[in-house]
Each structure stands twice: as structure tokens, then as C-alpha cells.
Amino acid sequence: MLKRKKALEDFGLDAEDIDKFLRFIAYVGKPYKTYFLFRPNLKDEKNNMVIELAVTSQSDYLVTSNTKDFKNTELKFDQLKIKTPSEFAKIWRSKDV
């Protein structure tokens, strides 16, 4: 998804830049175990696991191209902001997240 033409244009990057970014994320990322304590009851069960991991890791942002499937949940997590990759890139560049 990050290497789609629109994403590359939105980011102002090329495919090699994306590869470097993903290697960096893999290098600095921390593993977390999820225990299925938070069930936002999304339509797609796999999306519930993504929310669980974001909350468990105390993430500020959940970055996805599929924002609509994450916004209508029974549980609300005020600290978790759901953004598209291009929205997050703009925030990151402007605030140095």
C-alpha cells in the first residue's frame, strides 16, 4: 500500500525511500503481546486485533488506508488517533512526531 502510485505522490518519496522507512520501523519497533482485553467489536475481527495492539503499545496513532472500518467502534480510545498514511506523513513532517 505504501508503494502505490498515489501514496508515493502524497509522500513525495520513491519506492526505495519506503523500503528504508520500513527497515527503520522494523529496527526500532518493539514486540508486544495482545491479550484480547479490548474488543471494539468492529465488523472485521482482524481489525479488532489491530486496535488491541495499538492500545496495548500505547500508540498515539493508528495509520491505515482503511480508516472508515476503525471509526465506528463501541469502545472509544481518546488517545488513539486514526489517520491515513498521507495524513500521518503531513503530521509527522509538521510536528516531527
Image (cartoon, rainbow, N blue to C red):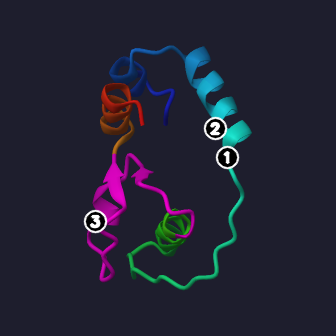
**Residue assigned mark 2:** 25
Give the secondary structure at mark 1.
loop
Residue 71, disc: 3
Q: Is residue 77 magenta?
A: yes
Residue extent of the magenta highlight = 56-83
**Residue 97 position within the rendered picture, expressed as x and y whole percent measured from the top left:** 42, 37
Classify 10 Å Cα crowding around label 3: few (below 14), some (14-19), many (20 and above). Answer: some
**Residue assigned mark 1:** 29
Q: Residue at x 36, y 25 (%)?
A: 93
Q: Residue at x 58, y 82 (%)?
A: 36
Q: Residue at x 33, y 23 (%)?
A: 10
Q: Amino acid at mark 2?
A: Ile
Give the secondary structure at mark 3.
helix
Q: Is residue 96 magenta?
A: no
Compared across the picture, whether 11 is left or right of 21 comes to: left
Q: CA distance from mark 3 to mark 2?
A: 25 Å
CB under 8 Å between discs 2 and 1: yes
Give the camera-side residue of 14 and 95. 95
Foreground disc of the pair 3, 1 = 1
Q: CA distance from mark 2 to mark 1?
A: 6 Å
Residue 5, disc: none
Give the secondary structure at mark 2.
helix
Q: Residue at x 57, y 63 (%)?
A: 57
Q: Earlier in the sequence, mark 3 or mark 1?
A: 1
**Residue 26 position within the rendered picture, expressed as x and y whole percent measured from the top left:** 70, 40
**Residue 13 position within the rendered picture, expressed as x and y whole percent measured from the top left:** 46, 15
Classify 10 Å Cα crowding around label 1: few (below 14), some (14-19), many (20 and above). Answer: few
